[in-house]
Image (cartoon, rainbow, N blue to C red):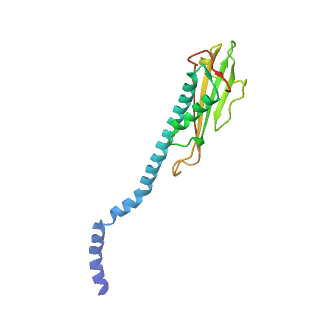
């Protein structure tokens, strides 16, 4: 008798349970939350990485451009040029960047060698060392200002992009006021 009453009520209760949608939203939210958090944090990390990469390009261009506008540069002027990189990289810390400016001299046989080099947070190139330039830049008896920047980018959250990425760029410019740029210590 009891089992007959339960058997009659069971289909009705199962139908009512199947029509009940009060918890569906919570289940859908719980399933989508990890995906949405990953997309959001990934978007933040990628956009910040792109922003820093753009700053690296601007910094390389700025230091090479500043040096290419003079006929002679001394220690004080070079310090100012290298310190300008912190303004360009702002709001990102300059201590994670290696900035290098080099004057490359190309002889009449199209051999490229370092005339002088200076660096911020890194090492300068050795004077007289041979360097490889793109073929289109090897114009005999000329000079090139070579600006290089490397930035060690480590994502803030590290949820999607992990580890440290080295973002780098370089640019070559011809001196504007003379055939070469003299580097003095005074």
Which sits in the foreground, 95 or 135?
95
User: Is residue 55 placed above or below 25 in the rendered structure?
Assistant: above
In the rendered image, the residue lying farthest to the bottom is 1
Q: Is residue 83 left or right of residue 185?
A: left
Of the 4 image quadrants, the one containing the N terminus is bottom left
Q: Position of residue 106 (x, y in %)?
A: 66, 17
Q: Position of residue 22 (x, y in %)?
A: 30, 66
Q: Quadrant of residue 8?
A: bottom left
Identify the residue shown where x is 55% and y is 26%: 66
Identify the residue shown where x is 31% and y is 84%: 3
User: Is residue 131 placed above or below 39 in the rendered structure?
Assistant: above
Q: Quadrant of residue 105?
A: top right
Marker count (numbered): 0
Q: Is residue 182 left or right of residue 15?
A: right
Q: Position of residue 43 (x, y in %)?
A: 45, 46
Identify the residue shown where x is 61% and y is 26%: 146
State whether residue 134 appears in this view.
no
Q: Position of residue 73 (x, y in %)?
A: 62, 24
């Amino acid at each position: 008798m009891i089992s007959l009453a339960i058997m009659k009520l069971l289909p009705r209760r199962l139908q009512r349970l199947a029509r009940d949608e009060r918890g569906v939203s919570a289940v859908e939210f719980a399933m989508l939350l990890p995906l949405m958090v990953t997309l959001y944090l990934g978007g933040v990390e990628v956009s910040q990485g792109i922003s820093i990469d753009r700053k690296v390009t601007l910094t390389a261009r700025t230091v090479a451009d500043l040096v290419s506008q003079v006929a002679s540069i001394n220690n004080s002027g070079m310090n100012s040029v290298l310190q300008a990189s912190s303004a360009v990289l702002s709001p990102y810390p300059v201590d994670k960047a290696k900035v290098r400016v080099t004057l490359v001299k190309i002889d009449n046989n199209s051999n490229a060698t370092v005339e002088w080099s200076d660096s911020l947070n890194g090492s300068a190139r050795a004077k007289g060392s041979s360097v490889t330039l793109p073929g289109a830049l090897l114009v005999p008896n000329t000079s090139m200002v070579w600006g290089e920047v490397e930035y060690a980018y480590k994502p803030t959250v590290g949820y999607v992009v992990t580890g440290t990425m080295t973002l780098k760029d370089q640019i070559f410019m011809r001196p504007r006021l003379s055939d070469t740029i003299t580097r003095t210590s005074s």
